[in-house]
Amino acid sequence: MSKLRTRSAALILALSIGSAFGATWQEGSTYTAGTQVDYQGKTYVALVTHTAYVGANWNPASTPTLWSVTTSSTPAPTAAPSATPTPTSAPTATPKASATPAPTATPTTSPSAAPTVAPTVTPVATATPATSSCAAPSWTASVYSAGSVVSYNGHTWKAQWYAAASDMPKQVTNSWESPWLDQGTCAAGGVTPAPTATVTPTATPTIKPTATPIVTAAPTASPVATASPAATATPAATASPAPVSGNKPQIIYAAAPAGYPSDAQLTSSENALMSQAGTDTQAIARIRAALRVLPDTQVEAVTPGNPANPDNVKRVERIISVSKFDSLFPVRNVAYSYTNLLRAVAKFPAYCDNYTDGRNADQICAKLLATSFAHFTQETGASWSTLTPAGAKAYPANYNPILDTMEQNTVIPTWNQALWYLREMGYNEGSAIGAYQDCFTGAGSSIFSIFYACGQNAQGKNLDYFGRGSKQLSYNYNYGPFSKSLYGDASVLLDNPGKVADTWLNFASAVWFAVYPQSPKPPMTWVVDGTWVPNAVDIANNMQPGFGSTINIINGGIECGGGSDVQQAKNRIAAYKQFTTALGVDITGEQLSCATQRGFQPGSAAATKTYLDKSWGYNANNPGGVSWACQLVDYQMPFSLATPGDYKACVDYMFRGQVKFNGQIVIDNAK
């Protein structure tokens, strides 16, 4: 791609205090935007706030989306990335493809992975006295995962998110200033009195950084024409080596103890929480409706013009014919077929849905398609300023027949260059080199590495989760939820990630993102169709229906709120104007920019608590006062009320779940 995109890894980034100005860069440290460091004889400035996680290799020289070389004559850049970089070698009018496979995309964490500030939380009173025994292990200068508990300096501390070895527990004014949250004083050798039945504690775990699911990847440089001989066929993408069970963490369950809730009681508790999750009692019902799916047997029966196609597919066909699709995407990778688009739409009936309240479904669908296509342009577009039909034909993977009908030496407009990239540049199926993984390594690993366990190839190496498809889906903790939404089983795509590129899932990943709620953000479909109606909190933050709010959903932490549009947002807006014109959509008066928007905040009309975590409350009726319950939280977890039955899954794992790894039980929640 010729658009710089910023990296903001979902689930693991959080705002904290950066290192000293001009210090030597160190892995494991956290840097705020504008911080300058020395690395390999050069001075770099941080473009965005981030943590250089151990093992991620996010050093300044290899991560241009995080760092930029600076000199005394160059002012420190802001958090907004720069615009399209100039290709290293100017392409000629009729470039020839080299023997290198057609480029795919280099990831950035886009739409929604931008970190959010963990809110300050007032602890709810518990039955535990202010001073208890320091039962937790003493803090050492080590790496800790979210949820770890330690004792230090007479206090018990809990990790809100990943804590580096340099993150010493300390008192802070705001909870987001440190990964460690003070759980109260403790005394060596002290005794914690048992709570009495008259106290009903409702303490909740510390708030973890909110992270949204979809991380996207995008190309980092425009295709560069070479003087190679005539184009040869691009090697076809090879399937991943057959996955094997390998050394995955295995979740097993201890026998339910006496008095443990029955399935009926757990279902009753789940139903009770549903009425508390949102601004009204129907919030979870709306979310479940947004995420409903069609069985694959019906999806794969969809073909252009088939009278048995679902209603939402027929609507898309009325708006975009095969020939219209080809004209809009003349240089698309050939794997992005019209049939694949229709099948992706079929999978999620909420996309281009029917309406029974008078809203014009066809007009809404046309606008939703224009919105999606505009974001495709930014995420997967070639963005090659001199790309012509003759030049595009030199790349077999992007050689569509429509190119033969076009003026061969006329530059193709940038907005027509979407869907060029299918896979991230430099990666192929089966490469298994450790990219974009949060894989289980034993006790202390994240809960996502357990429930979204990395697949392994025949050699026992973890599979890669690099960017694939029209949203360039990246990381196992995004492939897992996508797979779970599609199939009710996270392992389907974790064991076969190549399907996100080689099948209709290359469009379905983007459609899924469009219908997926990311509290406090609404789904993009709700912004377009009017389901999301701004409340007083939204209005105060200048959030209103329009294309600008969809930019905020995708990448608001990077592209929005700066007072003026950054280049990425300008690219999206320019493409949106072209696609709406092409599809006959009136956008008069619509707020296209997000430059003055302050984002979706807690209290927004779309804010819900759907995720579930262990309830640390005290129940005098249960042995030891355990709650045998899960509670609603607003940070991401593998359990969500959006999925029926997840409440039981949460309770079972938190109170009797065990994780077996290398033949041994390394996590035991039954103790």
Image (tube, helix red, strand yellow):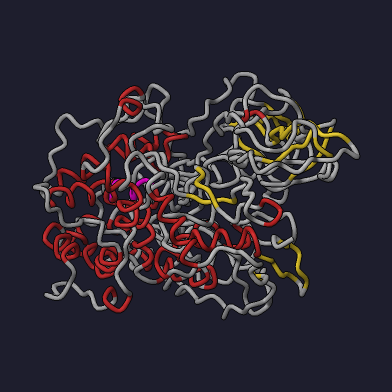
Q: Is residue 376 magenta?
A: yes
Nearer the observer, 402 or 145: 145
Residue 138: where, in percent of width, then height?
Answer: 85, 42
Q: Residue at x 79, y 40 (%)?
A: 193
Q: Residue at x 42, y 33 (%)?
A: 559
Quarter residue 462 falls in: bottom right
Nearer the observer, 96 or 512: 512
Residue 41: where, in percent of width, then height?
Answer: 75, 33
Number of numbered callouts drawn: 0
State which quarter of the image contains the C terminus.
bottom right
Assign the magenta stretch its main secondary structure: helix
Q: Residue at x 55, y 52 (%)?
A: 630
**Residue 148 shows in this picture:** yes
Q: Is residue 231 magenta?
A: no
Quarter residue 64 falls in: top right
Residue 125: where, in percent of width, then height?
Answer: 63, 33
Q: Is residue 167 above or below residue 395?
A: above
Q: Is residue 326 left or right of residue 625?
A: left
Quarter residue 539 falls in: top left
Q: Is residue 102 left or right of residue 170?
A: left
> Which residue ends up furthest to the right in the rendered image?
189
Nearer the observer, 75 or 285: 285
**Residue 88 shows in this picture:** no
Q: Residue at x 76, y 75 (%)?
A: 663
Residue 55: where, in percent of width, then height?
Answer: 71, 51
Q: Is residue 645 left or right of residue 75?
A: left
Q: Is residue 441 above or below residue 163?
A: below
Magenta highlight range: 373-378
